[in-house]
Amino acid sequence: KQYTLHAPPGSFRAFKALIAAEYGDVNVTVPEEFDAAAVAKLSPFGRAPVLETEKGAITSSNAICRYLAAIRPETGLLGDSVFEAAEIDSWVDFASNELDLPASVWVYPVVGYMQFSQAAYEKAKADLAASLAALDSHLLTRTFLVTDQVTLADIAVASSLVYPFKLVADKNFLKPFTNVVRWFTTCVKQEEFIAVIGAVTMCKTELKAPGQAADKKAAGGKKADKKTDKKKGKKEDKPAAPAPVKKVEHPYKIMDREAPSTMVMDTWKKTYSNAATYDESMSKFWETYDMEGFSLWHMVYNYNEENKRTFMVSNAIAGFQQRSDEVRKWCFGVMDVLGTEETTLEIKGVWMLRGDTTAHLIQANDDANWYTWTKLAGKGMPPTDETKKIVRSYWCEEDELE
């Protein structure tokens, strides 16, 4: 199905809809030229964004992103239960009610959308800081806002923060919100985010709005910069609002299109999780394994001698899997801690990757460089009985390996 999203170029309210569409591989096009007259006809409120569907138009950015996320429920963007869905909704509303207004009041004068006001500027910074403090507290013990993966909650909140974090919220402003910065950078490094908003460079120095430097005192009480342009009467250049970069298709997506596999990764993951016994799951795995489309790899950490404490090694594994989230649709892996603190702690595992190389995993996750990867099966290399034994030992054994 084809969907058309009408939105001004670079609209942050369109980001969340387009990112949700990326996660679900939903085909959404955005006209190159924004047609306000078309929006006025489609929307009873005359406001963008508006999503054109076969059944009619959907208005309101939150309704649009929820609709697009619901098209592919298997993505988990709306959670796996009614309660999780409600939690996600609360964060989507948080973005609209607590972030969008102060963020816009701070950013819009900088990009020339509204006139600068010192009082509004100071209030916007204070209000945004209060909301970020609440968000930071919530993220203290969490990787993502609701579940252990990106959901619509993360998409909506991160979308609201893209322009503030790129243009005005510098390191000094964000210093108290380390958990927010960690979470935000994790989100925007995902393939689906990059396809819509491009690579995000965090703000180093706050951009000032035209006329802002002429104020007598800045928010912190310091005298404003009295430097003026030597050429009198010259208008100050307005920083242009960044537009989303052209979508770059991921190599795995190209592979899915040009060399589709008979094996469906989501189906295998559900089989592995829901099978009554490991024997049942492995039997189904070898029945469906497509060695032309997927390869199996044994991984060994190159610096196992440095592993001293079990909890630290476990955190390293959790971090590795988290940083591999960009390619989770095309990968399945189990990593194990072998040995004891009294002897040697080793990190090893077995991964199944789309294609016949580890290059795309390494590109997504730098940590993969610190492992030695040995191919077990794949194109031109059928799985042997020994390979099947190794795979089963890592994916199924709960007590001892090897």
Image (cartoon, rainbow, N blue to C red):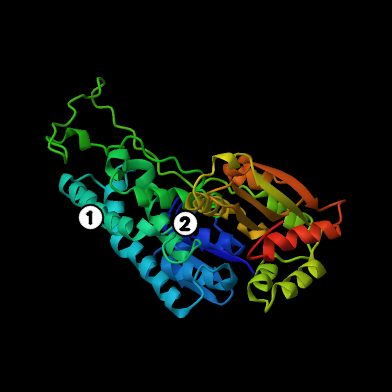
Residue 82 picture location, percent across and down: 45, 80
In the picture, measured across the screen, residue 240 lies left or right of residue 215, that is right
- Secondary element type, mark 2: helix
Which residue is label 2 attached to? 15
Farthest residue, direction front: 342
Residue at 73%, 51% in the rendered image: 297
Image quarter of the C terminus:
bottom right
Which residue is label 1 attached to? 127
The reply to whether residue 115 is in sight is yes
Count residues near mark 2 (Cα–Cα under 10 Å), then give few for <14, some for 14-19, many for 20+. many
Q: Residue 256 carries which label?
A: none
The reply to whether residue 36 is in sight is no
Q: Which amino acid does label 1 sit on?
A: Asp
Relative to the observer, which residue lies in front, 45 or 264? 264
Residue at 39%, 72% in the rendered image: 87
Relative to the observer, which residue lies in front, 154 or 164? 154
Asked if labels 1 and 2 touch by Cβ distance under 8 angstroms, the answer is no
Q: Which amino acid does label 2 sit on?
A: Phe
In the picture, measured across the screen, residue 94 lies left or right of residue 217, that is right
Label 2 or label 1, whichever lies nearer to me, is 1
Image quarter of the N terminus:
bottom right
